[in-house]
Amino acid sequence: MNRRWLTGAGVLAIAIGFAVLAERTLAMGLDRAALVLVGAFAILQGIRYTERRRHVDRTTATVDEPETRYHVPAPGDELDDIFDRGRHWHGRSYPQETARREIRDVAVETLALRGPDDRAAIRDRIERGEWPDDPVAAAFLTGRPLPPDARLRCLLRRESAYEHGLERAVAAVAAAEE
Amino acid sequence: MMEPFDTNRWTGIAGVALLAVGIGVLTEQPGAILAGVVATAYAAAARSGDAPAPALGLSRTLDRSNPEEDDAVEVTVRVENAGETLADLRIVDGVPPGLEVVDGSPRHATALRAGEVETFSYSVRAVRGVHEWTAADVVTRSLSGAQERREVLESATTLRCVPELGTDVELPLRGLATRSVGRIETDVGGPGIEFHAVREYRRGDPVRRVDWNRLARTGERSTVELRRERAATVALVVDARREAYRAPNRETAHAVERSADAVGRTLTALLSAGDRVGLAALSPRECWIAPGSGRDHRERARELLADSPAFAPTPPEDYLPRRTAVDWLRGRLAEGTQIVLFSPVCDDVIVGIARRLDARGHLVTVVSPDPTGEGTPGRTLAAIARRNRLRRLRRAGLRVVDWGDEPLAGAIARARRGWSR
């Protein structure tokens, strides 16, 4: 209801304005200073209102996509989420350690199924950096910094050392499977 | 009924109006003042009038309610306005999550006078199962677009697709057998087609079994024994837990759908061979048919594959603990029933379930539709982990069919080459 009264008051003010345009004598009581005051006030309020627009997002009713079927994830999508979380951290942070552990677990299983089934020994080798032969993948899996030449390459390519190490480690596990 | 909300479409227009008026007044420019007046009119229009509350009736008709799989079904939506005029009305129909729109659009925008009726159509592709439409979303807007109101319209509509079970796919079974004649080769002599042994002739043996060559050579009468073939009791078990709802991409059927399809084909072949076949799902949504045979049993299994919520296109919300799954299944299986487990084997729990069932005397064959994708480190690693699990199952003595993109019969033929009897 308030909104309607305000709208009405606004319409009335505009009507008076038009009336003044038609009959100038109605505005005889207003001098230049009063007009400047009104104009300045209008500009200040205008800036305030326009500024408010910058902080307001347009909203609209949103609905799901009915055209497509229910989408199920692919195996490994949840692992990619874990790997992505590691991208925002540095060093031996919890998200990066979680990513390393996931890769190490699959590596241990892969090697144990294709060679001597001594999982503790395999895990020790990985944690000591003795597996795989690729020094970048080995450093990544131990959590140590990558070798200097790999870090330099990452720097020149503007690639994250974490991502580079992760991809090489996954590639090493894939190679061990073959 | 939901409350209307502001869209903020005209937020700031009052500021533009005030700026124009202020500048016009200070510079004594009538044009600027006039622009301010126009902007004020817009601001006033934006603030007048709410998004109307719709009073609509919605109904749907399907051009067929029992389609075959892959048929396009046309859906016609009829909307009737029983309330005031709606200047801006948007309708988004609640297509079931398991169906894909293949023609037209379930979205419709219109203006609807009081008492007026509007219809629109779209087509969906039918897939196995019972599919229920959800509520349609309805959005009304004020004339200026400054306000919107969202409502939902319920209208029960169901599409039921019960496809044929598909062509036979013969899956070799393992050794356990019943007393009925069937196709499992046993180590016992008797009726069958494969040579088993030669024994001394006994009075009453059929003449056609007499070894005439031996009689001619040695003068002794002996009887040829064939390997007795007996029927098996088999439970076809689908892994329909949350973890099994996986697909390599949006376009491909997920592993539970592929498993249900494979179950249908295997069931046809097993029943044709005289085996007794049951059907179960490892899912919080219970599904079970005890082993049986015959045409009626086949029909019941066909209906269950389509109707059971266990094979729904969307995953269950609850998890199924391993021990619960094993106990539930073992409580239903008679001794000696062998299991064909259809599972993508995407986690270690299913490996434990399969091994435990096998160890308790239910010989397990695993048919594993491969849902793994590629292109990311996570997907590559998950594919390796799945192959490791299949390897572990094989090492434990279970038969495994790793079923990729090829037809199931091809995958079985490839797997058989690695099986010993």
Image (tube, coloured by chain):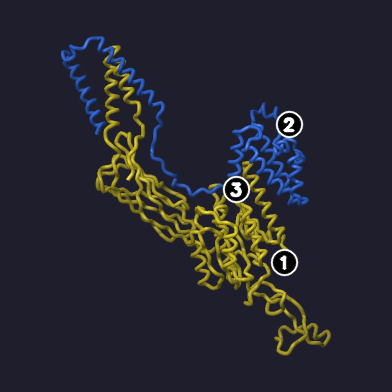
Chain colours: A blue, B yellow
Mark 3 and mark 2 residues within 8 Å of each other at the beta carbon: no
Image quarter of the N terminus of chain A: top left
Q: Quadrant of residue B149?
A: top left
Residue type marked 2: Pro
The residue lying furthest to the bottom in this view is B203
Q: Position of residue A169 (x, y in %)?
A: 69, 40
Q: Is residue B175 visible?
A: yes
Q: Judge whether A55 appears above or below B345 on screen.
A: above
Instruction: Give the spatial CA distance, label 1 vs label 2.
Output: 52 Å
The residue lying furthest to the right in this view is B218
The residue labelled by disc 2 is A147
Instruction: Give the spatial CA distance, label 3 vs label 2.
Output: 32 Å
The residue that appears at 63% across and 47% down in the rendered structure is B382
The residue labelled by disc 1 is B421
Q: Position of residue B153 (x, y in %)?
A: 35, 49
Q: Position of residue B260 (x, y in %)?
A: 55, 59
The residue labelled by disc 3 is A75
Neighbours of disc 3 within 10 Å: few (<14), some (14-19), many (20+): many
Residue type marked 3: Pro
Q: Secondary structure at mark 2?
A: loop
Residue type marked 1: Arg
The residue that appears at 66% across and 49% down in the rendered structure is B385
Disc 1 chain ID: B
Q: Position of residue A22 (x, y in %)?
A: 17, 17
Q: Is residue B34 left or right of residue B263?
A: left
